Amino acid sequence: MEWFTAPEYWMSRLVLQKALAVIYLVAFLGAALQFRALIGERGMLPVSRFVARVPFRQAPSVFHLHCSDRFFAAWAWTGCAVSVALVAGLDGQLPLWGAMVLWLVPWVMYLSIVNVGQTWYSFGWESLLLETGFLAVFLGNDEVAPPVVVLFLLRWILFRVEFGAGLIKMRGDECWRKLTCLDHHHETQPMPGPLSWFFHHLPKPLHRVEVAANHVTQLVVPVLLFTPQPVATAAASLMILTQLWLILSGNFSWLNWITIVLALAALELPGTAPDVPGAPLWYEVVVLAVAALLVTLSYRPVRNMISRRQVMNRSFDPLHLVNTYGAFGSVSRVRYEVVVEGTADAVPREDSDWREYEFRGKPGDPRRWPRQFAPYHLRLDWMMWFAALSPAYAESWFGALVERLLENDRDTLRLLRRSPFPPDTPPRYVRARLFRYRFTTWRELRETGACWERTYVREFLPPTRLDSVVQKS
């Protein structure tokens, strides 16, 4: 079938595959470095407990068969190695079927991690990586030109990501309709970046322009992804520019980066495609069968997207094949942060020597400027933002975090920027307090050197000893 392939997207496919492999690498690296404290044998939410109560059919994962820290580490680091091989172009050196198998490996491996990751892996970009990664299996290699059907299915993901996010904003917080959300968002977003302070202090009229442009990019431009060239390329380019703007304004893990990867499926990048024979019949049959399956599974995400009760970031099948996305249907007007402190004093008093734990990404010391971490995902820091919104978000894991801090647990402390206590001298008590944070003004920044100003709000967790935490658990 001559219509089946599109040689003009040869270079676009190549760049897309390399970029996706890099995102896989970042995801597996984060899993390898953070799992012990989060879901390891002594983690806050151990995988062993999860698989004991959740059947395989609800959360397919290799860890139902075997679960240990050593095995998980080997699994995650193997995922890193496979990702590096894909970045290096090993798939191009294999026969077509071999390349498909190679791309299937990281998808299966990361699916196994996400399905047992619980709260720590409940973010929309996990499903987005899996959905995109599954389609990448069928993109082909140097033996065949890019299949048109797969390119359009990648655009279909991008459409749902952007259009769904646009709809949930218009249905949600009225500040999106009034064009005022960015008066607050740069300050209250989960993890500000090094330029977020400056974005927050842009003139309010420019914030209005930002919001209006966002509505156009999410509600109008996605439709143009399915139009002929060069309109589709123009639409994808505009979406890429928008994502780059978001990358500069904050830390959103790999969400913006994988959105850019999806946009590559609509770009006609310059480059000469080599002469290759037509796609083999078996490949065409497999691709068309998968396409039919994914179109059928799209029914529930589409129904959700057009529903007045639209929900964000939900998977409708345990394999995360077709999902629904969206973000920031509501925007916080005030930023709260949970500040965790410990003391070595035998009796905890208000005037005790309370020392603050410093997290890597979330705001803490008002004088410490935010750093750029994305596309790397600091899972604990992100969940601490949710905990500040409501203690209910932290109910399942915060007590375990406090217990690990009281033990000076090495793996937990590795998730932090700095512990105020020596390795052999753990604190006797740990407490948590809720503070209101706001960006300083230009004048305050010049006078104090602090980018944040914080005000005590209330107690989040009273001074707690190790024995009391153990008894509660």
Image (cartoon, rainbow, N blue to C red):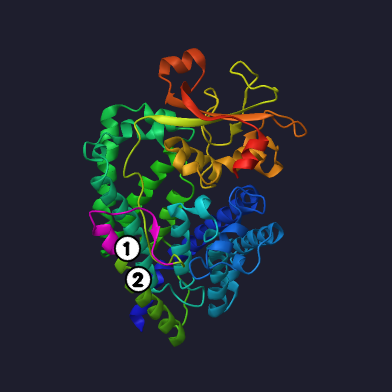
Residue type indicated by callout 2: Leu
**Dot 2: what SS?**
helix
Say whether residue 308 is magenta: yes
**Dot 1: what SS?**
helix
Q: Nearer the viewer, residue 347 or 406?
A: 347
Residues at marks 2 and 1, CA–CA distance in whole angstroms: 8 Å
Chain part drawn in magenta: 301-317
Residue 265 percent location from the top left of the image: 39, 63
Residue topped by disc 2: 297
Please indicate whether residue 310 sits to the left or right of residue 125 in the image: left
The C terminus - image quarter:
top right
Residue topped by disc 1: 301
| Extreme residue toward the front, this view | 471
Pointers 2 and 1 in contact (CB under 8 A)? yes
The residue shown at (39%, 80%) is 289
Residue 358 percent location from the top left of the image: 60, 31
The residue shown at (45%, 65%) is 13
Q: Is residue 436 above or below residue 305?
A: above
Q: Is residue 466 above or below residue 272?
A: above
Residue type indicated by callout 1: Pro
Q: Residues within 10 Å of mark 2 (few under 14, many from 20)?
A: some
The N terminus - image quarter:
bottom left
| Extreme residue toward the top, this view | 447
Residue 53 percent location from the top left of the image: 55, 62
Q: Which mark is residue 242?
A: none
